[in-house]
Image (cartoon, helix red, strand yellow):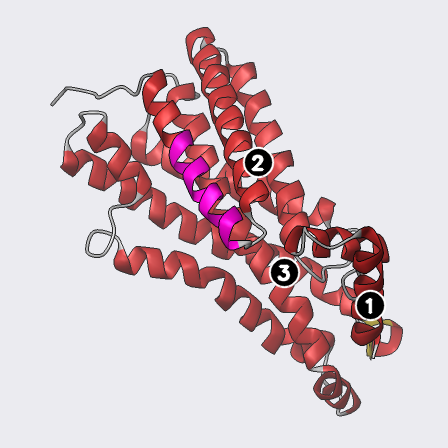
């Protein structure tokens, strides 16, 4: 099969115009998201085109060190995004998250690329780099969700955990319900995608290969491998992270220590957020309303 349909500059312009129309409607309705929508669209376009040119260069060079360097940058970015989205997680988890992602990514790449697909050369950039991006992109959100849920659950179970420790439970036994809840919640999106793919949805990789003129059956096999790898990567990475961080909720003599909650918004942050929602208010009104919101949240 062949017949790839390219998108020219006018196609990109039409896509941008669609977003601008949506942003205009949002501005008329005063939803407060018009500026964010336009900014996110511009950022997405620039980032995707930049990655396209970078991948084009890496594929043409066919150099193993360029591939390894690009994967390392993607891993660092994935760690930063994970920690940014994990609300309520304490500081000092970057090394643990990076370790878990590196170990699991190397394992998944070895299995998927070298045992299942078996490209030549083994570091084929047109396979390894996009594969890494898809695995990390689907795993980052799940890991952030799992981290947030773990610390939230440990805070909610404060009395229960103290009771278990008083009755002689170990740290592992006291934290186990929160650990299971975290891993289960992080895995739900992958399980849902596995269950619905091919019936409710045609996932992105399969759609992309079909649009590029590849065989739908071959595209379906590739998509299944990716979905299976994402589910396995999410479960293994989340399990490693939770197993390495659960002791941070305890101090010596098996005493429970409530993790420090997420940083509260400052008055300046509240003013900026309120300005996005109420752009017509004056500076004095914004400051007074933000101060009132802060006092109410403190109560």
State whether residue 20 is above or below residue 290. Answer: above
Name the residue: 60% across, 28% down.
72
Q: Which of 188/272 is in front?
A: 272
Where's residue 163, x and y in %?
75, 90
Name the residue: 67% across, 48% down.
84
Q: Is residue 103 left or right of residue 264?
A: left
**Viewer-side label of 2, 3:** 2
State whether residue 153 is above or below residue 185. Answer: below
Q: Looking at the figure, which quarter contains the N terminus?
A: top left
The residue labelled by disc 1 is: 294
Mark 1 is surrounded, within 10 Å at the Cα level, by few (under 14), some (14 to 19) or many (20 or more) other residues, namely some
Q: Which of 257/272 is in front?
A: 272
Mark 3 is surrounded, within 10 Å at the Cα level, by few (under 14), some (14 to 19) or many (20 or more) other residues, namely many
Are the two marked residues, 2 and 3, in contact with CB atoms closer than 8 angstroms?
no
The residue labelled by disc 3 is: 147
Q: Main secondary structure of the magenta part?
A: helix
The residue labelled by disc 2 is: 39
Q: Is residue 124 visible?
A: no
Q: Looking at the figure, which quarter contains the C terminus?
A: bottom right
**Residue at disc 1, secondary structure:** helix
**Labelled disc at residue 239:** none
* Span shown in magenta: 16-29
């Amino acid at each position: 099969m062949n017949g790839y349909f390219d998108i020219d500059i006018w196609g990109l312009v039409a896509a941008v115009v669609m977003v601008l129309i949506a942003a205009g409607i949002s501005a008329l309705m005063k939803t407060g998201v018009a500026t964010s929508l336009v900014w996110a669209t511009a950022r997405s376009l620039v980032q995707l085109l930049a990655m396209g040119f970078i991948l084009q260069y890496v594929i043409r060079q066919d150099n193993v060190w360029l591939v390894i360097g690009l994967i390392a940058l993607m891993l660092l970015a994935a760690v930063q995004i994970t920690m940014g989205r994990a609300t309520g997680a304490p500081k000092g988890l970057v090394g643990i998250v990076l370790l878990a992602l590196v170990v699991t990514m190397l394992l998944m790449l070895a299995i998927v690329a070298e045992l299942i697909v078996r490209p030549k050369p083994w570091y084929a950039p047109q396979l390894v780099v996009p594969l890494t991006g898809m695995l990390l992109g689907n795993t980052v959100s799940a890991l952030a969700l799992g981290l947030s849920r773990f610390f939230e659950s440990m805070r909610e179970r404060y009395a229960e955990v103290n009771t278990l420790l008083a009755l002689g439970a170990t740290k592992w036994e006291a934290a186990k319900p929160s650990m299971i809840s975290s891993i289960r919640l992080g895995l739900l999106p992958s399980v849902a995608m596995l269950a619905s793919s091919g019936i409710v949805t045609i996932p992105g990789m399969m759609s992309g290969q079909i649009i590029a003129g590849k065989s739908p059956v071959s595209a379906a096999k590739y998509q299944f491998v990716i979905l299976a790898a994402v589910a396995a990567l999410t479960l293994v990475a989340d399990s490693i992270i939770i197993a390495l961080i659960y002791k941070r909720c305890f101090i010596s003599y098996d005493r429970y220590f409530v993790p420090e909650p997420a940083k509260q918004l400052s008055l300046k942050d509240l003013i900026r957020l309120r300005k996005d929602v109420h752009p017509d208010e004056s500076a004095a009104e914004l400051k007074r309303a933000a101060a009132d919101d802060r006092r109410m949240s403190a109560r």
